[in-house]
Image (cartoon, rainbow, N blue to C red):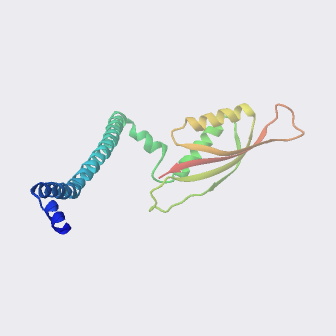
Amino acid sequence: MQKNKISNIIFTKKTRDYSFVILFLIVFSIFILAAIKPSLTTAVSLKKEDADLKMIDNLYESKISNITLIQSQMEDSREDLYLLDEAVSRVPEVNKMVEDVKNAADKNNFNIKKATISDVNLNPNKKTIDQVSLVIEGKTDFNSLILFINDLFLQRKLKTIPKMTITKDTEASNGAELNVVLTIEGYYL
């Protein structure tokens, strides 16, 4: 008897309608999760990708503007490019460097006693800036030394002085000559 009652309650039209609605909502929820969730994740990832692409676009735009600025500066400086070739030559040009140093020394009363050339790399395959070292020993007074160094730096050929040693005889007077050892480096491609 109870079975019939329960069966009548379960299979009434109202219960069947509610069961259908509940099953429909469950299937619809599963469908929404299965069909719409990938679309939502795709939309979120596309939004992030859009922000990344805008950032990359801004970076490229700044790089392109830098390139155009450099290009315009090159156009403005095109007539002065020969100065770069004079400052840093394509070959060592050791004789030119020695001549420039000798001229500056003669002009400024720097008495060169000894000159040594070292570090000349004649390998033409390298694509870097190389250097020639010229070590000179001589005697001069302090003011002439300053004038000599200034003349070296005013020459068109690029030179640096990475090492300089100045000594004075202990028995010499205040106006005595100084013993100077200079390392002068010239550069070439």
Q: For the point 48% across and 43% down, which residue is it?
A: 87
Q: Quadrant of the N terminus?
A: bottom left
Left or right of 111, for residue 170: right
Residue 145 place in picture, x, y as percent = 70, 36
**Farthest residue, direction right:** 171
Residue 20 place in picture, x, y as percent = 13, 57
Q: For the point 49% across and 63% down, which residue is it?
A: 123
Left or right of 83, for residue 78: left
Residue 78 place in picture, x, y as percent = 35, 37
Q: Nearer the viewer, residue 32 or 184?
A: 32
Q: Nearer the viewer, residue 70 or 82?
A: 70
Q: For the point 85% across and 41% down, which residue is it?
A: 169
Left or right of 134, for residue 80: left
Quarter residue 118 falls in: bottom right
Residue 88 place in picture, x, y as percent = 48, 46
Left or right of 181, for residue 158: left
* Vertical position of residue 115 compared to residue 55: above or below: below
**Farthest residue, direction left:** 13
* Vertical position of residue 73 compared to residue 102: above or below: above
Q: For the point 53% across and 49% down, which residue is it?
A: 187
Quarter residue 107 falls in: top right
